[in-house]
Image (tube, rainbow, N blue to C red):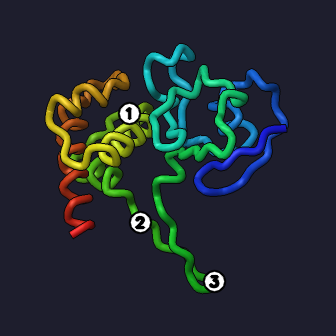
Amino acid sequence: MFNLTVNAKAYQADVEADTPLLWVIRESLGLTGTKFGCGLAQCGACTMLINGEPTRTCVYPVSALPAGAEVTTIEGVTELTEAPAGETGVQHWHPVQQAWLDEQVPQCGYCQSGQILTAVALLNKNPQPSEEDIENAMINICRCGTYPRIRTAVHRAAQLMQEANS
């Protein structure tokens, strides 16, 4: 039995120690926003944040999670405010998600959860990245080739985050 904190919520998962975190999150917890891509930790579709660090979870065994680790999936990036009884809450996009929408980044969308989480991690560490910083951090594969829009969206997200903090 493994105790996990995912998107600031506590979970227990009764899985084998060598089960990749991706499958624990998708199959045991039902959070299916993170995708399986290559199964070799090469493409980045399976990227989640572990204590803020982008991590390829298709080969990351659940037993490797440090005690008290915070796992963030794409579902944990969007905030949903509570609404009065009988009403629907309001969804608040993370600035990276908003920039992705503004710049029309997704084409097929399959890699986008991993791309977005990688960008979130980059901007949390480096709020004003250079082109080189973005190039070095955004190494996930996009089969549709939306790399120019991804770079533009990272710059746009940095601007949105700076505006939100001022």
Mark carried by residue 92 = 2
The kind of residue tagged 3 is: Gly
Q: Which comes sooner in the sequence, label 3 or label 1?
A: 3
View extreme (front): residue? 67
Q: Is residue 163 left or right of residue 31?
A: left
Give yes or no for contact between labels 3 and 2 (Cβ–Cβ under 8 Å): no
Which residue bears the numbered disc 1? 108
Q: Is residue 141 left or right of residue 64?
A: left
Residue pictured at 47% horizontal, 72% vertical: 90
Mark carried by residue 86 = 3
Q: CA distance from mark 3 to mark 1?
A: 35 Å
Residue pictured at 21% horizontal, 70% vertical: 166
Give yes or no for contact between labels 3 and 1 (Cβ–Cβ under 8 Å): no
In the rendered image, the quadrant that contains the N terminus is: top right
Disc 2 is placed on an element classified as strand
The kind of residue tagged 2 is: His
Q: Nearer the viewer, mark 3 or mark 2?
A: 2
Disc 3 is placed on an element classified as loop
Residue pictured at 46% horizontal, 37% vertical: 53
Q: CA distance from mark 1 to mark 2?
A: 23 Å
The kind of residue tagged 1 is: Cys
Residue neighbourhood size for the residue with mark 3, other residues' Cα within 10 Å, grouped as few (<14), some (14–19), many (≥20)? few
Position above or below: 136 against 99:
above
